[in-house]
Image (cartoon, rainbow, N blue to C red):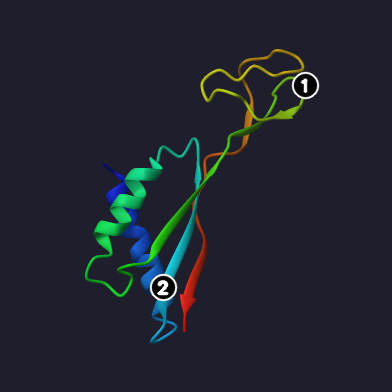
Amino acid sequence: MHEMSIAQSIVQIVQDEMDKRPGAKLKKISILNGMLAGVITDALTFAWEAVTIGTPMEGSVMEVKEVPIKVRCGGCGKEFIPEDKLYMACPDCGLEIGHEVLQGKELQIENLEIDE
């Protein structure tokens, strides 16, 4: 479960940010998880709860927003959101391969909600 090491990395990033605000307490962290990032949302939130035990972040909430896949057709240039992440036929020209991924690969911290 690589989500555990991802959660540990997020904890370090958040800790570095919290160190700039002595006495602040993390209430909520918002994460963007692209559908192609290979991260299972439930596993990541479980890992977050586990790795924050005994830290100043214990009890904080991790909100994960799943980002859909969006591509640009390599043939006609149409931007679209495919219904399936494996079969991505362009709705205009029917091309199935050669698309540019515009969104859906990201895994990033979107926001931190803290009490100061």
**In the image, which disc is placed on residue 76?**
1
Eye-nearest disc, 2 or 1: 2
In this rendering, is residue 104 above or below 7? above
Q: Where is residue 74 in the image (x, y as percent from the top left)?
A: 69, 23
Question: What's the residue type where badge 2 is placed?
Answer: Leu
**In the image, which disc is placed on residue 26?**
2
In this rendering, is residue 26 above or below 90? below
What residue is rendered at 32% in x and 67% in y? Answer: 59
The reply, left or right, for residue 76 in relation to residue 67 is right
Which of the 4 quarters of the picture holds residue 17? bottom left
Real-space CA distance between mark 2 and mark 1, rounded to the nearest whole angstrom: 46 Å
- The kind of secondary structure element at disc 2 is strand
The reply, left or right, for residue 111 in relation to residue 4 is right
In this rendering, is residue 94 above or below 84? above
Viewport quadrant of the N terminus = top left
* N-term mark: 2 or 1: 2
In this rendering, is residue 33 above or below 85? below
Q: Residues within 10 Å of mark 1 (few under 14, many from 20)?
A: few
Residue lying farthest top? 94
Q: Where is residue 7 in the image (x, y as percent from the top left)?
A: 33, 55
Residue lying farthest bottom? 22
Q: Where is residue 42 in the image (x, y as percent from the top left)?
A: 36, 44
- The kind of secondary structure element at disc 1 is loop
Q: How crowded is mark 2: few (under 14 residues within 10 Å), some or many (20 or more)?
A: many
What residue is rendered at 28% in x and 50% in y? Answer: 4
Q: Position of residue 16 (x, y in %)?
A: 39, 73
